[in-house]
Image (cartoon, rainbow, N blue to C red):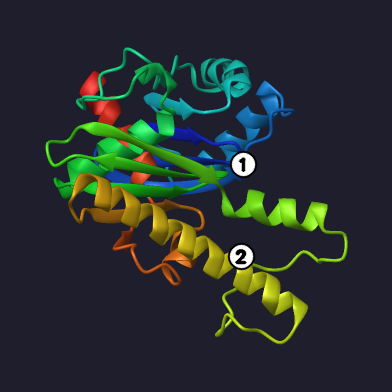
Amino acid sequence: MLLVMDVGNTNTVLGLYEGDKLLHDWRIRTVIDHTIDEYGVLILNLYKNGRTRAKPIDDIIISCVVPPMMNILVPMCEKYFGIKPMIVEPGIKTGMPIFYDNPREVGADRIVNAVAAYEKYKREMIIVDFGTATTFDYISAKGEYMGGCIAPGVMISSEALFEKASKLPRVELYTPRTVVTKDTVSAIQAGIMYGYAGLVDGIVERISAEIHSSPLVVATGGLATLIQGVARRIDLVDEMLTIEGLRIIFQRNK
């Protein structure tokens, strides 16, 4: 059994694999103030409640964009599972050439997404990951990571609006039927959703113009399905892309 962990700034996604088969997946909050034991008990309980009690976890792989979390998760894996986890970091075998000025600067989650997407779709593509930040990554038809760009995430943008504009209330992320709305809540919702869809479509169009091609656009992350309903340039959503990439990288290094 393989436990994969993708640690983001806001959420941590876990997946439990038996061979190539994903048995369970969970999403928990990333909390830097949690102790080794708090994370250990939480993850152990998730595992035990997943109807897999007869099958022990043999291996763990972690990708993390929050460095302080490694001081919690690595000793947690050793204490609660008796396993030294594999870490997605510079030097690990990905099977993908990385054409970046300094490959060490590329977030582990971006590489993991790229590996999974190319393994699955085998074509030129743009990967849009809706996390705390929204990342756009271009993968060539040869399976090369060519770079991309980073924008503020939907929730970051929303929180900034609510915090800086004292009269504007927090609203649920919902897409109104029209852009021209008749009340303040709907006006905020329309601005966030249609505005962000425009950001996604605009960046995808600019990347396509730069490369003189029309690559497949794959979205992933917690808000991918919501934004897909508004954006025009997202071809498909693959919510399990990151944890699938972790499984692939683990197998290539094992």
* Residue bearing mark 1: 10
Q: Amino acid at mark 2?
A: Ile
Q: Quadrant of residue 183?
A: bottom right
> Foreground mark, 1 or 2?
2
Which quadrant, please, contains the C terminus? top left
Q: Of label 1 and label 2, which has the lower sequence position? A: 1
What type is the residue that disc 1 sits on?
Thr
Give the residue at x 19% y 25%.
95
Q: Residue placed at 26% from the left, 25% from the top?
A: 99
Vertical position of residue 3 compared to residue 92: above or below: below
Q: Nearer the viewer, residue 149 or 77?
A: 149
Quadrant assignment for the N terminus: top left
Of residues 230 and 29, the one nearer the viewer is 230
Q: What residue is pinned by disc 2?
A: 192
Question: Residue shown at 61%/83% (left/top)?
Answer: 180
Give the side of residue 151 with respect to residue 56, left or right.
right
Dot 2 alpha-carbon crowd within 10 angstroms: few under 14, some 14 to 19, many 20 or more: many
Give the alpha-carbon distance from disc 1 to disc 2, as whole Å. Answer: 19 Å
Which label was assigned to residue 84?
A: none
Residue 1 in sight from this viewpoint: no
Instruction: Give the secondary structure at mark 1.
Output: loop
User: Looking at the rendering, which quadrant does residue 30 occupy?
Assistant: top right
Secondary element under disc 2, as helix, strand or loop, is helix
Measured as percent of width and height from the top left, residue 131 is found at 52, 46
Residue 2 drawn at (x, y percent)? 36, 32
Q: Position of residue 252 (x, y in %)?
A: 21, 24
Q: Residue at x 29, y 63 (%)?
A: 235
Q: Is residue 252 left or right of residue 5?
A: left
